[in-house]
Image (spheres, helix red, strand yellow):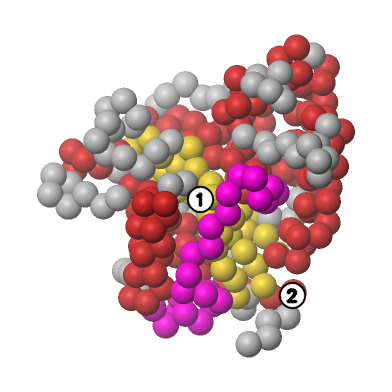
Amino acid sequence: MFVHPSRRYRLYIDETGTQTLKKSHQDRFLCLLGVIMLQQTHDTSFTSSFRQLKADIFGHSEDNPVILHRREMVRGKPPFQALKDDPFLAMDFEWRWLEMVNTAPFIAIGGAIDKEAHKKRYLVWQHDPYHYCLEILVERFVKWLDRLGFVGDVVIEARSKFADKRLKKAYQRLYHNGNNAITAEKAQTVLLSGELKFSRKHDDVAALQLADSLAHPVLRYLKTKHLNEAPAVGFGAQLVEALLKAKLARHPKTGVVEGWGLKWLGE
């Protein structure tokens, strides 16, 4: 079936945290962050400007590709040590990254879970946290596509063979059976495939790197709001402010973000 490029969107998903419940007291939180973007725009202008930014700051090239990963950048690991060594370069990067977030044509949706609270609340039924958050993002993507008359698919960063296989099955269940929020008919009408797509870091998918940069600040914001933790400051706070201002999905009439662009699980 031919789909005009102006109607074909993609949800790009990355995460901060891990899915395991076994050590939830140590690794308590998981957040999946999704970036919705017109696939044609992503593959052309957005990817081009994204790679130019990496080339200007970090020397990215086809022969020497640089994949942005927030954790490595914060730690100043190569090739990001310059962010630690040169405060002016760090300021330039943050300004340009924030400008990109403000101007790039995307919508963001995030789902986070307090795994320890989830275990205490559901002593018998304990849904896989990663699958739980994925379902939240996909159902919101389906509703967004349906409301606006678009179609699309979903790509997520690959992890391990075992984890990816289980995640693939979780996506297939939602596609074929629906859930309490969306019917299978609606999912199959707007989702172009019943298969979840996977991409690895070395594939250099721009929107996945964007999602990676936003997942932790969004989790920090949700923890502040729901657990009364101290709010983020600095660059992370600026990113969240940009998302709250114009990028997070929201109720089409009231503009409410909670429950639409952000969902907190485990209370």
The answer to whether residue 34 is left or right of residue 117 is right
Where residue 158 is drawn, which disc sits there?
1
What residue range appears in magenta? Answer: 181-207
Residue 66 visible at all? yes
The residue lying furthest to the bottom in this view is 1
Could you classify mark 2 by the number of other residues whose Cα lies within 10 Å: few (under 14), some (14-19), or many (20 or more)? few
Q: Which residue is mark 2?
A: 5
Which residue is rendered at x = 38% and y = 50% of the image? 163
Residue 91 on the magenta span: no
- The residue lying at 34 percent from left, 70 percent from top is 173
**Outermost residue to the top:** 85
Which residue corresponds to the image point at 79% horizontal and 14% vertical from the top-left?
86
Check disc 1 and give the amino acid type: Ala
Which tag is nearer the camera, tag 1 or tag 2?
Answer: 1
Disc 2 element: helix
C-alpha separation, residue under disc 1 versus residue under disc 2: 26 Å
Going by the numbered disc 2, the residue's amino acid type is Pro
- When asked about the image quadrant of residue 7, the answer is bottom right
Residue 28 image-quadrant placement? top left
